[in-house]
Amino acid sequence: MTDIPPAAQNSAAALSTRIDTLRPHTARIWNYWLGGGDYYEVDRVAGDRIRELHPAIGEYARADRLFLGRAVRHLVAAAGVRQFLDIGTGLPTADNTHEVAQRLAPECRVVYVDNDPLVLAHARALLTSSPEGRTDHLDEDLRNVEAILERTADTLDLSRPVGVLLLGVVIFIGEDEDPYGIVRRLMAGLAPGSHLALSHTVTSPAMPDVDEAVRFWNAHGTPRLHQRTPEAVARFFDGLELLEPGVVSCSRWRPERVPDGCEPPEVALYGGVGRKN
């Protein structure tokens, strides 16, 4: 058995002191809905209650994961992207960003960014790279765009295109924090040919149970969620070339193996991919 270096032990100890096991956390509940095992009892209870309020919520988690895979495969195979910045990583499951990308192009480099201590602890242990590529993990908040870009430059060449993934993370940025400005600043720091893949829970009169589930979450969980309409989600792509089919239900963004004339069921999680020209 190999000894763990003191620096790694100190880092792990520091992360563990930040883990709050008394309140449910969105990354752990998402992991629970995806069938993972990295959650606490408080997360399971909250996750089950949300599922009672909105029974289709588990489909959102799966739709978002499948959207990630289709978006990354497109960026690698069709757009030639070999670098990825995945912000709001969440807990590792199957087919993480580097696995999807490096399956097609082993030399791909990926930087994962999150500020949840449990996510970081698992990421450093599980999100490893192919020998030809590289992965790195940053303890940082999406709001700190300049710090993310500065630290990312240690792993990625920002003079070349980067695929940015903001899946289910901008929902935690309130209107008073300038969410659109944050995304604009992030993309402004990247080279032409870079792409943004973004997903976001939406509010719609047709799906009132979604709003009820979000109200429950905001009363009991952390961090707080901010819903937006599909039109408001589309605004995150202002200034980018929005790829077909636009901003749609994640389940309907270039779905695979769909019979002619059929569409997958809609989920209240919308996403899209845009290119910086």
Image (spheres, rainbow, N blue to C red):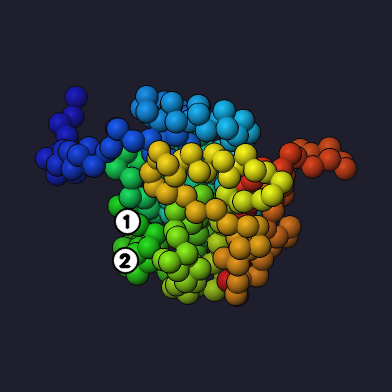
Q: Position of residue 94 (x, y in %)?
A: 50, 34
Q: Is residue 244 visible?
A: yes
Q: Badges 2 and 1: C-beta atoms under 8 Å apart?
A: yes
Work out which quarter of the rendered image holds the C terminus and state it: bottom right
Location of mark 1 (residue): 140
Work out which quarter of the rendered image holds the N terminus and state it: top left
Give the number of callouts.
Answer: 2
Q: Residue at x 17, y 34 (%)?
A: 4
Decide which of tag 2 and tag 1 comes sooner along the chain.
1
Q: Is residue 26 above or below residue 203?
A: above
Instruction: Judge from the rendering whether residue 203 lies leftward or rightward of residue 261; answer left or right.
Output: left
Q: Amino acid at mark 2?
A: Ala
Mark 2 neighbour class, 10 Å CA radius: few under 14, some 14 to 19, many 20 or more: few
Q: Is residue 187 visible?
A: no
Q: Nearer the viewer, residue 20 or 254?
A: 20
Q: Residue furthest right?
A: 261
Q: Residue at x 75, y 40 (%)?
A: 264
Q: Residue at x 22, y 37 (%)?
A: 16
Instruction: Judge from the rendering whether residue 265 lies leftward or rightward of residue 76; answer left or right.
Output: right
Q: Is residue 27 above or below residue 245?
A: above
Kindly indicate the quadrant of the structure image that contains residue 140: bottom left
Q: Position of residue 262 (x, y in %)?
A: 84, 40
Marks 2 and 1 sit apart, C-alpha to C-alpha, by 8 Å
Q: Nearer the viewer, residue 202 or 271?
A: 202
Instruction: Judge from the rendering whether residue 236 lies leftward or rightward of residue 9; answer left or right.
Output: right
Q: Position of residue 177 (x, y in %)?
A: 41, 66
Q: Position of residue 47 (x, y in %)?
A: 48, 30
Q: Is residue 274 above or below residue 23?
A: below
Q: Residue furthest left?
A: 6
Q: Residue at x 43, y 26 (%)?
A: 45
Location of mark 2 (residue): 147
